[in-house]
C-alpha cells in the first residue's frame, strides 16, 4: 500500500500541474486524483465529493491533499477533511512540490507531507540576472 494524492484546486490548475508532472517524469508513481473547484460551485457539495474521493483513494496508508491557496474555497474544502487521522493537507501547490512528492512514492504520510513542504519551498528561487 502507498499514500495516494488528491489535488483540490481552482478550475484546471490541478489538471495542468498533474499533466506537467506526469509528462516530466514519464509516468505517475502514485495514484492521484483531481477535484477542480469552479467559482459557482456549491462548497458543501464539493466537500461531499472531496470526502468520496478521499475514501476511494485511501488504501490504508492515507491521502495527501495538495491545494492551491489557503483560505480559498479549494483550501477550505481541503481543510474540512483535516480532522481525519489519515489525511494531511499542504497548500501552495506548485510543480516542484508535486514532482518532489512523486519522487518519493514509498514514504509514509508524515514523511511525504514533509517532502511536499520542502519541494514547494525549495522550488521557489530568486532568479537574478547574471552579468
Image (cartoon, rainbow, N blue to C red):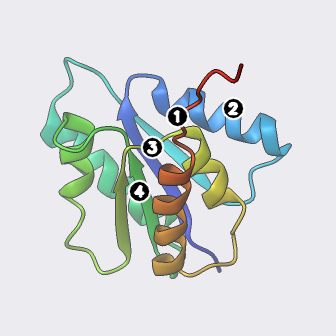
Secondary structure of the residue carrying tag 3 is loop
Q: Nearer the viewer, mark 4 or mark 1?
A: 1
Rendered position, 27 above or below 41:
below
How many C-alpha atoms fall within 10 Å of the one at disc 1: few (<14), some, or many (≥20)? few
The residue positioned farthest toward the right in the image shown:
26
Q: Residue at x 66, y 50 (%)?
A: 99
The reply to whether the C-beta atoms of the residues labelled 1 and 3 are less than 8 Å apart is no
Q: Nearer the viewer, mark 1 or mark 3?
A: 1
How many dots with numbers?
A: 4
Residue at mark 4? 65
Q: Residue at x 46, y 75 (%)?
A: 62
Q: Position of residue 3 (x, y in %)?
A: 56, 71
Q: Position of residue 82 (x, y in %)?
A: 23, 66
The residue positioned farthest toward the front in the image shown:
131
For the residues labelled 4 and 3, the Cα–Cα distance comes to: 10 Å
Residue at mark 3? 93
Q: Earlier in the sequence, mark 2 or mark 3?
A: 2
How many C-alpha atoms fall within 10 Å of the one at disc 2: few (<14), some, or many (≥20)? some
Q: Earlier in the sequence, mark 4 or mark 3?
A: 4
Residue at mark 1? 126
Secondary structure of the residue carrying tag 4 is strand
Q: Position of residue 55 (x, y in %)?
A: 40, 65
Amino acid at each position: 500500500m502507498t499514500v495516494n494524492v488528491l489535488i483540490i484546486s481552482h478550475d484546471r490548475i490541478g489538471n495542468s500541474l498533474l499533466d506537467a508532472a506526469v509528462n516530466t517524469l514519464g509516468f505517475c508513481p502514485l495514484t492521484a486524483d483531481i477535484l477542480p473547484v469552479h467559482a459557482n460551485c456549491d462548497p458543501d457539495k464539493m466537500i461531499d465529493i472531496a470526502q468520496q474521493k478521499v475514501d476511494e483513494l485511501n488504501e490504508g496508508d492515507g491521502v495527501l491533499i495538495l491545494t492551491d491557496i489557503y483560505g480559498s474555497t479549494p483550501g477550505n474544502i481541503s481543510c474540512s477533511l483535516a480532522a481525519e487521522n489519515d489525511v494531511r493537507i499542504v497548500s501552495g501547490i506548485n510543480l516542484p512540490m508535486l514532482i518532489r512528492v512523486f519522487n518519493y512514492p514509498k514514504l509514509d504520510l508524515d514523511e511525504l507531507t514533509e517532502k511536499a513542504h520542502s519541494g514547494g519551498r525549495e522550488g521557489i528561487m530568486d532568479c537574478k540576472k547574471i552579468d
